[in-house]
């Protein structure tokens, strides 16, 4: 001992003196448990990154997680601007929740990419549309992450729909608004998120310490069960037995005899078995044996087939189309078409005019069960619309 205390020891001493002998972080979560939490987060967020790639159609990279302890003041120092807190609650398999923290700008870029933009439309305030879109993205991402966790923990895990809130960390936060575990010490997992050349920043995942310990215990228990099962299988596994040789089938024997050829595994009449010499003769090589089989006469005759004639049974008559005359078909009249992005559709309001790809006065299309069959023009019959057929499509 050189008498010099590390920064972690100094921080632990200060915490114990100010909190009246509170338990240190190392006692709450061991280094082994922290490594397990990091591995779980690494696999889960790797799966989530694949899902995010399919949503934004951009290359997504998430770095190896860094696990540490933190409190509310640490989060406020790490994020100066307003950020988005996304709460993920577990309903099956695990009892608890965690929070994913994203920067305001990152949320705007992701939601713009999801709506068909190029990720540069980040002006304006973050609204309900952005929060709804990022909640849906996190629902799919964390849903796939829960599937990965199910494989690791060997049990079914499911989540509730994520809830996103915009929180300004520079203002005084009411404890009733945030999760209860954020008022004390918790586990912070930091990732580096990169989406193409649009995003290169940090995201955080916050876990309550009891919830983190529960996941570690599940992983440890699952690994012990797998180890015991593997050891038990090795002890009880029987020695491998040689595979029995298949006996020749009677049908195969009869066919071989009828064709005048030897059956596999049976000698030809008057010939020795392969690999066994005749009495007083040396063993034949492969070339000699092939020559011997080539001299054996084989009964070959052309195949005979029944000739096809033009005689058709008299029981068949012409098809009767009257049998399907009463089958109902769906007739659709198409005035025109157009395509809009999700952003444009969300901007629809009563009174919005949608321009179609058809010129005024141009014949409209008539479709039967989705098949284009005719053209026509719109007419009015009393108080209803009708179509006058002007052309039949051949």
Image: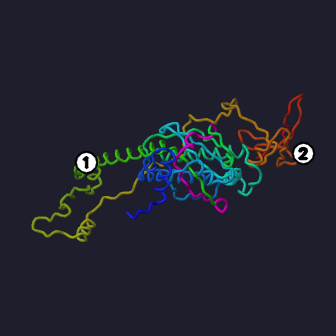
Local crowd at mark 2 within 10 Å, few (<14), some, or many (≥20)?
A: few
Residue 92: give x, y in percent of width and height: 50, 37
Q: Write the start and end of the magenta stretch as one range.
A: 176-199
Point out which mark residue 361 bears: 2
Say whether residue 390 is left or right of residue 240: right
Say whether residue 260 is left or right of residue 384: left
Q: Residue at x 67, y 32 (%)?
A: 324
- Image-quadrant location for residue 285: bottom left
Say whether residue 228 is left or right of residue 202: left
* Residue that badge 1 annotates: 237
Task: Indicate the secondary structure of the residue bearing disc 1.
Answer: loop
- Image-quadrant location for residue 190: bottom right
Say whether residue 31 is left or right of residue 128: left
Residue 290: give x, y in percent of width and height: 26, 68
Residue 55: give x, y in percent of width and height: 63, 51
In this rendering, the answer to whether 280 lies above or below 299 is below
Q: Is 208 one of the magenta-colored residues?
A: no
């Amino acid at each position: 001992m050189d008498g010099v205390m590390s920064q972690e020891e100094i921080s632990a001493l200060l915490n114990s003196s100010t909190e009246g002998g509170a338990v240190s972080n190392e006692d709450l979560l061991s280094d082994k448990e922290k490594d397990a939490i990091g591995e779980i987060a690494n696999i889960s967020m790797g799966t989530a990154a694949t899902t995010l790639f399919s949503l934004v159609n951009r290359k997504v990279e998430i770095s190896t997680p860094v696990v540490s302890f933190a409190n509310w003041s640490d989060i406020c120092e790490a994020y100066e601007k307003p950020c988005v807190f996304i709460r993920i609650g577990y309903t099956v398999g695990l009892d608890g929740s965690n929070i994913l923290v994203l920067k305001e700008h990152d949320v705007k870029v992701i939601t713009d990419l999801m709506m068909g933009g190029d990720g540069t439309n980040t002006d304006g305030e973050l609204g309900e549309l952005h929060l709804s879109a990022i909640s849906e993205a996190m629902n799919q991402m964390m849903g796939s992450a829960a599937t990965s966790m199910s494989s690791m923990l060997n049990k079914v895990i499911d989540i509730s729909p994520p809830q996103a809130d915009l929180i300004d960390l520079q203002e005084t936060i009411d404890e009733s608004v945030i999760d209860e575990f954020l008022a004390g010490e918790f586990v912070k997992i930091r990732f580096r998120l990169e989406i193409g050349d649009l995003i290169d920043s940090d995201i955080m995942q916050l876990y309550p310490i009891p919830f983190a310990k529960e996941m570690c215990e599940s992983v440890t228990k699952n690994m012990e069960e797998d180890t015991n099962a593997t050891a038990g299988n090795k002890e009880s596994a029987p020695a491998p037995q040689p595979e029995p040789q298949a006996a020749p089938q009677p049908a195969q024997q009869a066919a071989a005899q009828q064709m005048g050829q030897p059956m596999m595994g049976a000698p030809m009449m008057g010939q020795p078995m392969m690999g066994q010499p005749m009495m007083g003769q040396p063993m034949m090589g492969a070339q000699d044996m092939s020559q011997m089989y080539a001299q054996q006469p084989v009964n070959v005759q052309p195949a005979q087939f029944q000739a096809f004639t033009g005689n058709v049974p008299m029981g068949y008559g012409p098809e009767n189309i009257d049998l399907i005359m009463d089958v109902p078909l769906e007739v659709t009249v198409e005035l025109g078409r157009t395509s809009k992005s999700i952003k444009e559709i969300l901007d629809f309001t009563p009174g919005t005019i949608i321009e179609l790809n058809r010129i005024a006065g141009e014949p409209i299309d008539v479709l039967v069960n989705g098949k284009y069959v005719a053209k026509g023009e719109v007419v009015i019959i009393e108080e209803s619309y009708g179509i006058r057929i002007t052309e039949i499509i051949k």
